[in-house]
Image: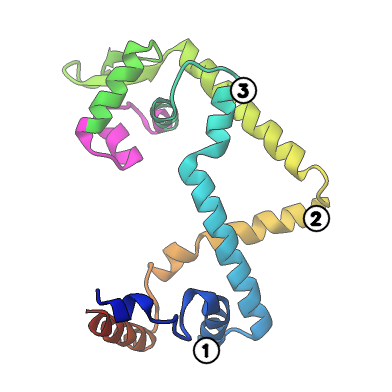
Amino acid sequence: MTDAKQNAPHSAHGCSDMGAEKLQQFVEYGLSPRAAEAAISIDETMGVMRRSIARRTLLQQAVTEMKLDVDLAHLMVINTICTARADGEVTVGLVAERMDIDPSRASRLTADVVEKGLARRVASQADARRICLELTPRAQAYQEAIHAYKALMFAEALQSWDEDDLVEMARLFARFSHWAMDSGLAPKNADRLAPIIARLREAETKAD
């Protein structure tokens, strides 16, 4: 990168103007200004939630406060085994699939969980040659404690809410959560996407 580019002032489309630009974009794509402001607020809130979820803040807090002898990755394996059991027997391959991780990593994590006494290997009832996983009573106690912890946190956070507001929020949140599946993770109008890609290609050319 040249000194000129490094020292160039931010353009009208720099980060400082991102809020106004986002508002303009939402309006351009069909929302009223008031609806656009609400959409931006939702987007920003989702960003905060994603970062918190990525750090697993609540889960880490539960582990710390209740002094559980387990790390977060192992807790995720325990939870996966617990929820997957509802659909039948749980194998390492199913753990990998449900956690969306490489089978070798799933194998290492499940081995750690077994070594910690939080899960055990058992023979499949359908095929004795296949090894399955089930939780030990200690792991089940961990699960129950964490669920109770989360329920306590949610109840304390929401107990001051008006009941009707909370019920309506749950309905709208569920409706919103399906947008990705409903939209297929792509704009329905491909013609609207073309100018965005064109601007990107132009910006890439100028940056080179």
Residue occupying image coordinates x 75% and y 44% = 158
Q: Which residues are magenta?
A: 84-104
- Residue 196 in which image quadrant: bottom left
Q: Nearer the viewer, residue 119 or 126?
A: 119
Name the mark nearer the viewer: 1 or 3: 3
Residue linked to disc 1: 28
Q: What is the secondary structure assignment of the residue under circle 2? A: helix
Q: Quadrant of the N terminus?
A: bottom left
The CA span between labels 1 and 3 is 48 Å
- Gap between marks 1 and 2 measured at Cα: 34 Å
Say which mark, if any, is on residue 89: none
- Vertical order, 62 against 40 (above or below): above
Give the mark nearer the N terminus: 1 vs 2: 1
Residue, disc 2 = 164
Q: Is residue 15 above or below residue 175?
A: below
Q: Is residue 12 shown left or right of residue 190?
A: right
Residue at the spot of label 3 = 65
Residue type marked 3: Glu
- Whichever of callouts 1 and 3 sits on the residue coming sooner in the sequence is 1
Left or right side of 20 for 187: left
Quadrant of the frame with the C terminus: bottom left
Per the image, label 1 sits on a secondary structure element best described as: helix
Q: Is residue 148 above or below residue 187?
A: above
| Overall secondary structure of the magenta section | helix
Q: Identify the residue at horizontal 48%, vertical 12% (top origin).
A: 138
Q: Residue 161 at x, y = what percent?
A: 81, 50
Mark 2 is surrounded, within 10 Å at the Cα level, by few (under 14), some (14 to 19) or many (20 or more) other residues, namely few
